[in-house]
Structure formats: structure tokens, C-alpha cells
Image (spheres, rainbow, N blue to C red):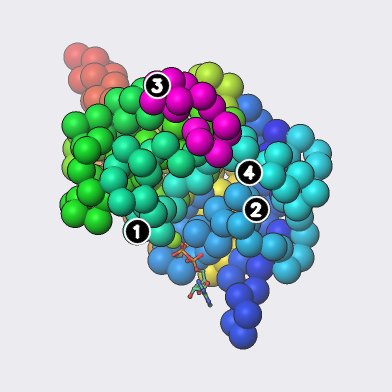
């Protein structure tokens, strides 16, 4: 289990970027962190990854402070940075994806296998021989993701994994999150897309100016359209359409749920 209690962070010389954040994510659960620009999503991911030291509170993995776990936590934790440029460091794609497996002291064959499999999973297998800095933004993102997956993380922390990707890329990210969750991994991802959160998350943490504006089961948080708007997040389009049509009750959050509601309404009309 990944948890934090009263977590806060102040950048040197700055104000509080996040404050008073408490949460818990169990294996097999996905938490979506939603919030407007500058609400603290990236800061929270870096804290959960143990890459920033909290100014207050702490982050625990299975009840132990991640600062105490050090390298043992780094080994199980995979972080996808918001900007792939912060992630890619090796000259070629193949070398870059191999960094994680090499750090885990895999044998040469194991490294090759891990690189191949991760590249396939992230849809980057056709890029293996390319130079990292010559890739397009979307390609870089896939390679960065492959690098994270190659180290077989048990905790997956993804900062805006779907932003800047085409339709195929977004579908790939969705199926990866589902697969890692059902495999029992802990998944935390940030997004500004409430529909993506509705499709993937068990729970949602809604940040507003670094503070927790809402935290709870995904359906509960995402059905409260006023709460989302207060935090500067666009509510799911199916829910907006439902409300604009003057319909009450729990709004549909995904296209599939909207279709279901329309079928029900058609039935009612006879
Ligand atoms: N390196 C930094 N130094 C000072 N302030 C920062 C730094 N990085 C982010 N911030 C500030 O911290 C707040 C939260 O930023 P961030 O976590 O990047 O938000 P988000 O990812 O939701 O856009 C913002 O006010 C931002 O300006
Ligand atoms: Mg960010």
C-alpha cells in the first residue's frame, strides 16, 4: 500500500505547492489526481516517487517511510515524468529502455527480453534503433513509458501519461493502466481529463491550488460537476450533456454510460 499523511511541499523560495494531502492506494487500485494547471499534480507525483523530500508529513510504502526505504523503494517504483525530455537520457531508444533493467542487474538476455517486451507494451518496438533526441513528442512519450515498464514496477506513478498522445497512444495508455491495476500494482496517474479518470480510476483526488478539494470514490467525485468546475476541471462531457438536457440523478460519466441512459430513456418513451 502507498499512503501519505498531511503531505506538504514548499519549493525553495516559493510558497506551498501542495499542503495537507492524505491518501491511500492499495495494490490493484488506480488513483487519478485531477486538477488545473499549477494545482500541484506534478509535485505530488515527485513526492510519491520519493524524488522530493516532503516539507511536512511523509510518504509510506507498506507502512514504511520511503526515505527510509531508499533504493529498495526506487526498485519497485516506476515514474513517468510529465515531460519525456526529463526522462530520456541515453542516445538510442534501445539503450534508454535498457537503463532500468541494467540497474536491476539482469543478465544480458534478460535485459534484451525486458527491453523488447516493454517496447511492445508501449507501442515503441518500431523505434528501438532510433536516436532518442530525434523522436517526435508522442514517440518520446512512448519510449519514456517503455523505459518505466521495463523495470517491472509494482508502483506505477504516471504524470499526465495521456497528454500529447494520438488516439492510439491514449488507448494504449488506458489498456496499460488497466493491465497493471488488474495485476495488483498500485497505479497513480495525473490528468486534467475527467473522462479519462472516469474510465480508469477507482478513486479520485481533486486538487485546487495545492489543497485537497475532494477525495473519494471516482463516481462520487466525478458526478459532482460543481466541485470539478470550482477546481477548474472540465466535467465529463456525457455528464454535462445530461445536465444540459435537464435530467436529474446520477449523471453518466463515460460515452458507454451515456449510451445506456439513452437506451433507458428510449424504453421509457415507449
Ligand atoms: N521548481 C519549482 N520552483 C518553484 N515553484 C515551482 C516549481 N515547480 C512548480 N512550482 C510551483 O508549484 C505549484 C504546483 O506546480 P505543479 O506541481 O507543477 O502543478 P501541476 O502539475 O498541477 O501543473 C505551482 O504554483 C508551480 O508554479
Ligand atoms: Mg504537472
N-term-proximal mark, 1 vs 2 = 2
Residue 179 in sight: no
User: Where residue 257 sits in the image (x, y, percent)?
Assistant: 32, 27
Magenta stretch containing residue 212, yes or no?
no
Q: Nearer the viewer, residue 207 or 113?
A: 113
N-term-proximal mark, 2 vs 4 = 2
Q: Quadrant of residue 169?
A: top left
User: Where residue 242 sits in the image (x, y, percent)?
Assistant: 29, 40
Question: Viewed as shown, does residue 213 lie left or right of 233?
Answer: right
N-term-proximal mark, 4 vs 3 = 4
Give the residues drawn in magenta, as a range: 101-114
User: Which type of secondary structure does the marked residue at label 2 adopt?
Assistant: loop
Determine which of the numbered discs, if any, sits on residue 85 in the image. 1
| Residue behind label 4 places its C-beta within 8 angstroms of ligand 1 | no
Determine which of the numbered discs, if any, sits on residue 50 in the image. 2
Q: Dot 3 corresponds to which residue?
A: 113
- Characterize the local packing of mark 3: few (<14), some (14-19) or many (20 or more) Cα atoms within 10 angstroms: some
Q: Dot 4 corresponds to which residue?
A: 74
- Characterize the local packing of mark 4: few (<14), some (14-19) or many (20 or more) Cα atoms within 10 angstroms: some
Question: Viewed as shown, does residue 204 lie left or right of 86?
Answer: right
Amino acid at each position: 500500500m502507498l499512503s501519505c499523511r498531511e503531505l506538504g511541499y514548499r519549493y525553495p523560495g516559493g510558497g506551498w505547492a501542495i499542503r495537507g494531502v492524505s491518501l491511500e492506494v492499495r495494490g490493484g487500485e488506480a488513483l487519478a489526481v485531477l486538477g488545473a494547471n499549477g494545482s500541484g499534480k506534478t509535485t505530488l507525483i515527485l513526492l510519491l516517487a520519493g524524488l522530493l523530500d516532503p516539507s511536512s508529513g511523509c510518504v509510506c510504502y507498506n507502512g514504511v517511510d520511503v526515505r527510509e526505504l531508499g533504493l529498495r523503494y526506487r526498485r519497485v517504483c516506476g515514474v513517468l515524468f510529465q515531460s519525456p525530455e526529463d526522462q530520456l537520457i541515453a542516445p538510442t531508444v534501445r539503450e534508454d529502455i535498457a537503463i532500468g533493467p541494467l540497474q536491476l542487474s539482469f543478465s544480458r538476455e534478460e535485459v534484451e527480453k525486458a527491453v523488447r517486451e516493454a517496447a511492445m507494451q508501449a507501442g515503441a518496438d518500431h523505434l528501438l534503433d532510433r536516436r532518442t533526441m530525434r523522436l517526435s513528442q508522442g514517440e518520446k512519450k512512448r519510449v519514456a513509458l517503455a523505459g518505466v515498464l521495463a523495470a517491472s514496477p509494482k508502483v506505477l506513478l504516471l504524470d499526465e501519461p495521456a497528454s500529447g498522445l494520438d488516439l492510439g497512444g491514449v488507448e494504449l495508455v488506458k489498456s496499460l493502466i488497466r493491465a497493471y491495476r488488474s495485476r495488483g500494482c498500485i497505479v497513480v496517474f495525473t490528468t486534467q481529463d475527467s473522462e479519462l479518470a472516469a474510465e480508469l480510476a477507482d478513486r479520485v483526488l481533486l486538487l485546487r491550488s495545492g489543497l485537497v478539494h475532494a477525495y473519494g470514490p471516482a463516481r462520487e467525485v466525478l458526478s459532482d460537476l460543481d466541485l470539478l468546475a470550482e477546481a477548474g476541471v472540465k466535467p465529463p462531457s456525457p455528464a454535462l450533456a445530461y445536465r444540459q438536457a435537464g435530467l436529474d440523478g446520477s449523471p453518466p460519466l463515460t460515452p458507454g454510460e451515456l449510451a445506456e441512459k439513452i437506451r433507458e430513456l428510449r424504453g421509457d418513451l415507449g
